Amino acid sequence: MPQSTPMLHLVCGLAASGKSTLTAELGQSPSTVVIAQDLWLAPLFGDQMTTLQDYRQAAAKLRHAITPHILSLLNKGISVVLDFPANTVEDRLWMREIIDTSGAAHRLHVLDVPPEVCRARLHARNARGDHPFAVSDEQFDRLAVHFMPPNAEEGFEIVTHRAT
């Protein structure tokens, strides 16, 4: 039976910081659905994403298309774990709109993992080949430049996860 107050879980962290691992764990809760950006982007736009701008355009299209589905789930009392990076103010504005429209409770999980740990995890992930996208060191650096952790003024309930 769905819970009465759905929870929207959001994740923020550098590439290979553990966002997908955390979202999979959060998705084990009853009446909870995980929606993973990369699992949608790869088949829909993978061959069209060669630059950071291409990625941004594809991600924006996906957000626009999937928002009504996310709202429907939350409005039916189903919790949603968004495995979408909440790494920029723009990303979080979209997520804030979902929260404000649905009235769902939320948690923004911030993964505080040093870049050198993320880079080592990225190399291991690329070697395993078990992720829809292989990210090069150059791409990691370009993405990291745009990373902006949330601040209190954005109004999120923040839960910080530090690397151990």
Image: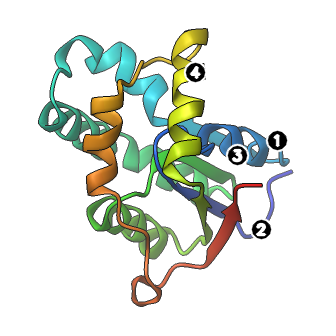
Front-most of residues 141 and 10? 141
Is tag 1's residue or tag 3's residue first in the polypeptide sequence?
3
Is tag 2's residue or tag 3's residue first in the polypeptide sequence?
2
**Picture quadrant where residue 109 is located:** bottom right
Task: Look at the picture and state if 150 lies above or below 30.
Answer: below
Report the label total: 4
| Residue type (three-letter) at the residue carrying disc 3 | Leu
Badge 2, how many Cα within 10 Å: few under 14, some, many 20+? few
Which secondary structure, mark 1? loop
Closer to the camera: disc 4 or disc 2? Answer: 4
Image location of residue 30, percent across then percent down: 85, 47
| Residue type (three-letter) at the residue carrying disc 4 | Arg
Give me the residue at 27% from left, 54% from top. Answer: 145
Which secondary structure, mark 3? helix
Q: How far apart are marks 2 and 3 (CA)?
A: 23 Å
**Picture quadrant where residue 98 is located:** bottom left
Task: Look at the picture and state if 48 lies above or below 34.
Answer: above
- Residue underneath mark 3: 22
Which secondary structure, mark 2? loop
